[in-house]
Image: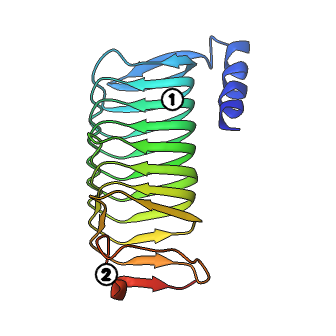
Amino acid sequence: GLSALASSALADGHKSRDHHGGSKLIGNDLFAMQDETKPDGALNSLWAVSETITVTKPIERNAHMIAGEIAVQAPVGGSIYAAGEEITIAAAVLGDVSLAAETAKIEPAGAIDGNLRFFGDSLTIAAPVAGNLLLMAHHLALEEVVVGDVYFGGETLEFAEAAKIEGQLFLRPGLDLEVPASVISADRIVRKD
């Protein structure tokens, strides 16, 4: 999986650590290829390939990450581009979030001001999404409000009591899903390829 990709990249980096491994701060942009990446200060941007990545300090611009496990616990002023087995966003993101993961969770503190794109097995959204939601996922658990449209190319949807879709819901034909009227009115559900 993706952790194998990260492990392979790290193994290559360990072979010639002087040129490829470790981390380098250029200006206030961190470039890291190491087993664990946990920046110790605020950054302009982050580029990292690691086994685990934990962001506990703010990132002013964008975060580009590949790891087995990724946890974003501090605000991101731009966008997040991430691939991993397990991804957790637990802080506000002012831009877009694009994720490829086996499982991902947008925690209650992880409000997204832009669009959310997800490709993977399972996504849980427990924070508001101000933009659109584009999903190619087996399962979506929606626990909060999506202001824009939702494009769902998956199999199962689960809705919490607070879940709402303020735009339209696009589903592929033949997908027989019950969508409560409390989430979205039937006239805003579109079934098309």
Q: Which mark is residue 185?
A: 2
Which residue appears farthest toward the top when viewing the image? 18
| Mark closer to the chain start, 1 or 2 | 1
Q: Nearer the viewer, residue 92 or 159?
A: 159
Residue at 42 percent of width and 24 percent of height: 54
Quadrant for residue 59, please give it. Answer: top left
Q: Residue tagged by mark 1?
A: 48
User: Which one is in front in this view, the residue at disc 1 or the one at disc 2?
Assistant: 2
Which element type, helix, strand or loop, lies under badge 2?
A: loop
Circle 2 packing at 10 Å, graded few (<14), some (14-19), many (20+), is: some
Which element type, helix, strand or loop, lies under badge 1?
A: strand
Where does residue 163 sit, x and y in percent of width and height?
Answer: 31, 61
Q: Amino acid at mark 1?
A: Ala
Where does residue 71 sit, x and y in percent of width and height?
Answer: 43, 30
Quarter the C terminus occupies:
bottom right
Is 154 placed left or right of 78 in the picture?
A: right
Quadrant for residue 173, please give it. Answer: bottom right
